[in-house]
Image (tube, grey):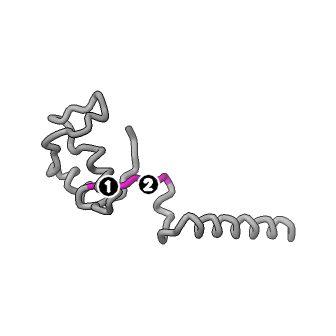
Amino acid sequence: MPGRAIISNFITKVREGKKQPKKCPFKCIKTCDISKSPYCIIIALINALKGNFDSGYAFAGANAFRATKILSVKETFQSLLAEYKESKLIKLNK
């Protein structure tokens, strides 16, 4: 499955081959072979949810590189609405 993981200490360790799950507590993916898997995805995502990026990671969308700061949902929608209104004004003035 393709994904865009945000680089973290965990991802660095996985790339270096330093992570290997010792057990599979969830059996969430039928095709998962613990002996060949570099990490347990569920444990990694739970750790990230808890803010532990030494033992987990998060995904980002294709445009994540454009982000310059983290905004709340409310701030994001306010920004989008302001940009929309500005674009409408520009079109009216042409």
**Residue 84 belongs to magenta span:** no
**65 or 51: which is nearer to us?**
51
Q: Which mark is residue 60?
A: 2
Quick check: 24 left or right of 48? Answer: left
* Amino acid type, label 2: Ala
Type of secondary structure dominating the magenta stretch:
loop
Q: Residue furthest front?
A: 25
**Marks 2,1: beta carbons within 8 A:** no
Per the rendered image, the range of residues in magenta is 56-62
Location of residue 66 in the rendering, given as x and y in whole percent from the top left corner = 50, 64
Location of residue 75 in the rendering, given as x and y in whole percent from the top left corner = 59, 70
Name the image quarter holding the C terminus. Answer: bottom right
Quick check: 91 left or right of 32? Answer: right
Q: Which residue is mark 1?
A: 57
Location of residue 38 in the rendering, given as x and y in whole percent from the top left corner = 20, 43
**Residue 61 belongs to magenta span:** yes
Which quadrant holds residue 30? top left
